[in-house]
Image (spheres, rainbow, N blue to C red):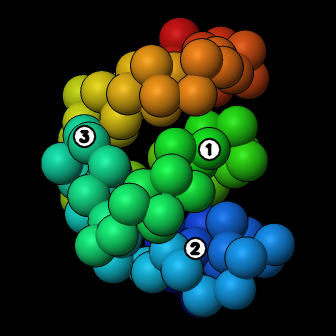
Amino acid sequence: MSAASMIAVHLNAPYGPIVSEQDVIESLRSGRFSAKSKIANDILAALFIETYPSLIFRCGREIGASLEAICELYQQSVRLTGLSCQEWEQAQK
């Protein structure tokens, strides 16, 4: 199973199939939440809170996302949720 698929399955657990593997991929590659629907983007906003940094980094490597884009996505997540993630911030160092 790809890392993007594992992330989508985990984020969808409480809601059903809303976030797709492609939503995860496009968001990590572009550095902004890029799902096809607002609700999927709202769920994706919790990506860094809900997912281990190691899985996000693995996904980034698998899909060819730049570290810069992933970090931009994290900053957007913090702006949208108002929540930072110490584990993520330490993993970037």
Task: Indicate whether 64 appears above or below 87.
Answer: below
Q: Dot 3, how many residues are within 10 Å of its Cα: few (below 14), some (14-19), or many (20+)? A: many
Numbered disc 3: secondary structure: loop
Q: Which residue is mark 3?
A: 31
Tell me residue 92's x, y (percent): 51, 19
Q: Which residue is mark 1?
A: 46
- Which residue ends up furthest to the left in the rendered image? 30
Tell me residue 29's x, y (percent): 23, 53
Is 67 on the left or on the right of 30, as rendered? right
Sooner in the amino-acid sequence: mark 3 or mark 2: 2
- Which of the 4 image quadrants contains residue 53? top right
Q: Which residue is mark 2?
A: 8
Is 72 on the left or on the right of 44, as rendered? left
Q: In 3D space, how far apart are the residues under numbered discs 2 and 1 (Cα atoms)?
A: 12 Å
Sooner in the amino-acid sequence: mark 3 or mark 1: 3
Q: Residue at x 60, y 17 (%)?
A: 82
Mark 3 or 1: the one toward you = 1
Q: Amino acid at mark 3?
A: Gly
Q: In 3D space, how far apart are the residues under numbered discs 3 and 2 (Cα atoms)?
A: 17 Å
Q: Amino acid at mark 1?
A: Ala
Numbered disc 1: secondary structure: loop
Image quadrant containing the N terminus? bottom right
Q: In 3D space, how far apart are the residues under numbered discs 3 and 1 (Cα atoms)?
A: 14 Å
Are the residues flagged by discs 2 and 1 in contact, CB closer than 8 Å? Answer: no
Decide which of 65, 37 is in the foreground and name it: 37
Q: Dot 1, how many residues are within 10 Å of its Cα: few (below 14), some (14-19), or many (20+)? A: some
